[in-house]
Structures are given as structure tokens and as C-alpha cells.
Image (cartoon, rainbow, N blue to C red):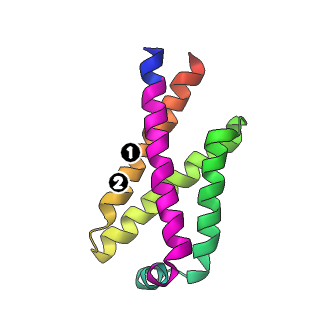
Amino acid sequence: MMKTNKIIYYVATSLLTLLMFFSVGMYLFNNAEITKGFISFGFPTYLIYPLAFLKIAGLVTIWFISNRSLKEWAYAGFFFNFVLAFFAHYMISDGEHIGAVIAIVLVLVSYFYSKKIKTN
């Protein structure tokens, strides 16, 4: 059972990492499109680069930092980011809210299975 929990954790966390790298890549290398999106949401565009940095910092924390409090903050930050992204996309009806739902599922699975493999 322990091996199954580890596999689920690593698969979910790896998929979450890929999703975040894709997001950061879009923020950094397709900035014009992301800027248009932020403007359509009514968000300030100066948040794009700090969000990209914080997503990378969250991934580094989840994968490499052993401090439990920092990991909790990273998971919480991802969770709130995805919930807010879901509602932002849902409210303007652009059809992109499904990606946020997938991200929420991945972050929850990663979080709860990280707890399971730490307690066993």
C-alpha cells in the first residue's frame, strides 16, 4: 500500500509540476497573450511576473524543501490560485475553467498523498 501511495503522490505532483511549468512558460514567453487575458479579467498586469516567480518557488518548496510549514504555504498558495483562476475563467465564460479544475484535483491529490507517505 505504501508503494501505491508514493506512486500516486509522484504522478500527481509531477503532473502539477508540468502544468505549472506550462503556465510559467506562457507567462514569460507569451506575455502579450497573457497580458490580454489579465486585462479581460480586470486584473493588473504587473502581477504576471511575480506570479510566475511564486509558482516556481512553490514547486521548489514542494519538491526540495523539508520544512512542513513552507510546504503547507506552497500548497495553500497553489490551491487558492487555482480556485481563483477557476472563478475568473468561469465568470467570463471563456471555457478555460476546466484547466483550473484539473489543477485543483492535482494539488489536492498531491497534498493529501504527501501527508500519507510522511505518516507511514
Residue 1 vs residue 64: left or right?
Answer: left
From this view, report whether residue 46 is shown above or below residue 83: below
What residue do we see at 35% from left, 54% from top?
Answer: 101
Quadrant of res 56:
bottom right
- Image quadrant occupied by the C terminus: top right
Q: Which mark is residue 26?
A: none
Q: Secondary structure at mark 1?
A: helix
Residue nearest the observer in this picture, 117 or 77: 117
- Residue 55 % position (x, y): 59, 58
| Residue 81 visible somewhere in the drawing | no
Q: Is residue 11 magenta?
A: yes
What residue do we see at 48% from left, 63% from top?
Answer: 23
Q: Say which residue label 1 marks.
A: 105
Q: Say which residue label 2 marks.
A: 101
- Image quadrant occupied by the N terminus: top left
Q: Residue furthest front?
A: 29
Q: Which residues are magenta?
A: 6-33
Residue nearest the observer in this picture, 47 or 10: 10
Q: Secondary structure at mark 2?
A: helix
- Residue 105 % position (x, y): 38, 45
Residue 76 vs residue 65: left or right?
Answer: left
From this view, report whether residue 80 is shown above or below residue 46: above
- Identified by mark 2, the residue type is Val
